[in-house]
Image (tube, rainbow, N blue to C red):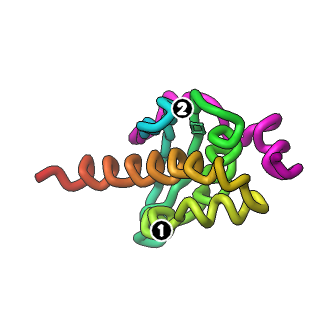
Amino acid sequence: MYNNKVLDHFKNPRNMGEMKEADVVGEYGNPVCGDLMFIYIKVANKNGKDIIKDISFQTFGCAAAIATSSMITELAKGKTLDEARKITRDDIATSLGGLPPQKLHCSNLAADALHNAIQKYYSKKNPQ
Ligand code: FES
């Protein structure tokens, strides 16, 4: 059902765990299954651009949710916030070599939690 890359990210998740010194914590709950993800980001300014210096996650969900969470931390680390917010669920699934069709919705969790974190960072930086 899952390919070896997905299984590897599920069994050996990258950047997993709470980050105490995070600037913001994004979260997203999947309304269909109730699975939940938190994504922690630490932002640094480099050459006038905000980049994701560090990122980690906690996911309470299925194998695909954990694998996609792990993959999005690898995709987003070192990217500018603008680049990172363009990462889509398809990018995540493609980077994992594909997901079973019935598990594609699970990649929403990671993409939406990251987008939520970035949005929170902008709101914190530019309060209205
Ligand atoms: Fe809930 Fe996969 S079944 S995210």
Residue drawn at x 41%, y 37% is: 31
Task: Specify which label sits upstream in the sequence, 1 or 2.
Answer: 2
Ligand 1, seen in the image, is in the quarter at top right
Looking at the image, residue 97 lies above or below residue 102: below
* Mark 1: amino acid: Lys
Q: Is residue 16 shown left or right of residue 30? A: right
Residue drawn at x 48%, y 46% is: 42
Asked which secondary structure carries label 1, the reply is loop
Q: Is residue 11 shown left or right of residue 32? A: right
Residue linked to disc 1: 86
Disc 1 and disc 2: Cα gap in Å? 23 Å
Residue drawn at x 51%, y 33% is: 33
In the displayed orientation, state which residue is furthest to the right. Answer: 4
Residue linked to disc 2: 19
Residue 32 is situated, as x and y percent measured from the top left of the image, at: 46, 37
Please check the rendered image and state whether residue 23 is part of the magenta-colored stretch, yes or no: yes
* Mark 2: amino acid: Met
In the displayed orientation, state which residue is furthest to the front. Answer: 102
The span shown in magenta is 1-27
Closer to us: mark 1 or mark 2?
Answer: 1
Please check the rendered image and state whether residue 48 is part of the magenta-colored stretch, yes or no: no
Residue drawn at x 67%, y 45% is: 70
Q: Quadrant of residue 101?
A: bottom right
Q: Is residue 75 shown left or right of residue 114? A: right
The yes-or-no answer for disc 1 within 8 Å of ligand 1 is no
